[in-house]
């Protein structure tokens, strides 16, 4: 580790999470579990006394953190002290924002609410602070327009539950300073998360993929192809297991782009255009970039190391199947609801 990397990994970072709902609480737990202080700002404006709610949030966050066997917040590896959680109201959060290095906005998915909160945040944070919205609804380009300096704005899309799921999708715009993207991804890695970076596109990466899978699964139930139980088991024991070791693009290369090319043509003829292969698959087929067999596809492969690469991936499969095998073979715990036939008149 270089001196710079060591400094970045050990320096104090002031984190403020604006919004004390489920997402905000999960993000706070993720930082606390990594031994870092967090301010959680309850910014909901109402005539009622919110102090009891803030106290309940503080207790809930800390109790769940202590109950998690994998989250040892008793010793802060960075400073040798216990991490501190501050749950405060909007007025008290102003002082915390002034010292913040990173601010996560986690308020409801209503643009007027976000406009109000981000304008308020922008007025009180330091000029070099990163502002990250956790929105799954609005593009980062829209969020960037709500502050004076769009170069420090990005979206950080945490998957629920935020403290447990390792992935965080970081979406940047053309106006986002690349240094701020590096700063955010470095911070997320520091607390044990796995950041991926994407552009301002609807659905990010995971929601876009899972929407297709979930809709197709529901369609198969609707068509009577299989029961919900068997479809879910097929995904858990087959699709999900394989994709947890090989991502979908790596899987194309592994099996061969030609397999996907011909399968897509067959499924398109049988089931419709939603299965039509994109141009990149057809181009890879035409230019002999079919994956492992051509030593190039979505990835490049060194012919001398392919065998070692394949053996390593197979060891990952074997380890996963040994771990999950008994669980996957267990009897289902849910009872299915009968699904009526679709209304063809709609």
Image (cartoon, rainbow, N blue to C red):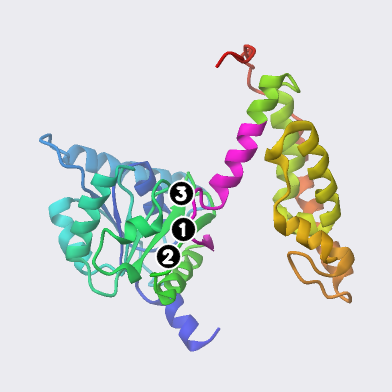
86 lies left or right of 223: left
Instruction: Check the image and report above or below for 340 versus 100.
Output: above
Q: CA distance from mark 2 to mark 1?
A: 6 Å
75 lies left or right of 51: right
Q: Quadrant of the N terminus?
A: bottom right
Which residue is at a point 88% across and 74% down the rendered structure image?
303
Q: Quadrant of residue 313?
A: bottom right
* SS for callout 2: loop
Disc 2 to disc 1: CB gap under 8 Å: yes
Disc 1 or 3, which lies upstream in sequence?
3
Where residue 287 appears, x then y in whole percent? 82, 66
Residue under circle 3? 162
Disc 3 or 2, which lies upstream in sequence?
3
Residue under circle 1? 200
Q: Residues within 10 Å of mark 2 (few under 14, many from 20)?
A: many
Asked whether the viewer can see residue 290, the reply is: no
Q: Residue farthest to the bottom?
A: 3
Q: Residue 207 lies in magenta, yes or no?
A: yes
Which residue is at a point 65% across and 23% down the rendered structure image?
333
Start and end of the magenta stretch? Answer: 193-216
Disc 1 to disc 3: CB gap under 8 Å: no
Q: Residues within 10 Å of mark 3 (few under 14, many from 20)?
A: many
Q: Residue 314 lies in magenta, yes or no?
A: no
Instruction: Check the image and report above or below for 193 versus 328.
Output: below
Which residue is at a point 53% across and 52% down the rendered structure image?
70
Mark number, residue 173: 2
Q: Quadrant of residue 178?
A: bottom left
Where residue 211 appears, x then y in whole percent? 58, 39
Q: How many marks?
A: 3
């Amino acid at each position: 580790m270089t001196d710079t990397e060591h400094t970045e990994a050990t320096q104090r970072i002031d984190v403020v999470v604006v919004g004390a709902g489920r997402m905000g609480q999960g993000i706070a737990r993720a930082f606390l579990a990594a031994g870092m202080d967090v301010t959680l700002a309850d910014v909901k404006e109402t005539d009622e006394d919110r102090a009891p709610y803030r106290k309940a949030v503080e207790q809930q966050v800390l109790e769940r953190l202590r109950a998690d066997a994998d989250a040892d917040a008793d010793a802060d590896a960075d400073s040798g002290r216990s991490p501190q959680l501050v749950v405060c109201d909007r007025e008290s959060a102003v002082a915390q924002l002034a010292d913040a290095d990173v601010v996560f906005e986690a308020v409801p998915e209503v643009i007027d609410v976000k406009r109000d909160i981000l304008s308020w945040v922008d007025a009180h944070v330091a000029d070099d602070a990163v502002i990250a919205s956790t929105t799954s609804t609005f593009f980062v380009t829209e969020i960037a327009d709500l502050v004076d300096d769009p170069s420090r704005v990005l979206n950080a899309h945490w998957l629920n539950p935020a403290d447990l799921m390792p992935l965080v999708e970081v979406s940047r715009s053309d106006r986002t300073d690349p240094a701020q993207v590096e700063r955010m991804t470095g911070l997320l890695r520091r607390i044990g998360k796995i950041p991926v970076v994407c552009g301002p596109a609807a659905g990010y990466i995971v929601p876009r993929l899972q929407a297709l899978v979930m809709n197709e699964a529901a369609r198969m139930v609707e068509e009577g192809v299989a029961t919900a139980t068997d479809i879910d088991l097929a995904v858990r024991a087959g699709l999900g297991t394989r994709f947890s070791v090989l991502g979908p693009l790596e899987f194309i290369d592994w099996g061969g782009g030609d397999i996907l090319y011909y399968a897509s043509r067959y499924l398109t003829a049988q089931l419709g255009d939603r299965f039509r292969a994109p141009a990149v698959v057809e181009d890879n087929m035409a230019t002999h970039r079919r994956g492992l067999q051509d030593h190039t596809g979505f990835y490049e492969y060194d012919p001398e190391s392919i065998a070692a690469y394949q053996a390593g991936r197979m060891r990952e499969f074997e380890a996963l199947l040994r771990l999950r095998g008994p669980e996957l073979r267990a009897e289902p715990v849910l009872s299915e609801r009968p699904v009526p036939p679709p209304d063809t008149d709609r």
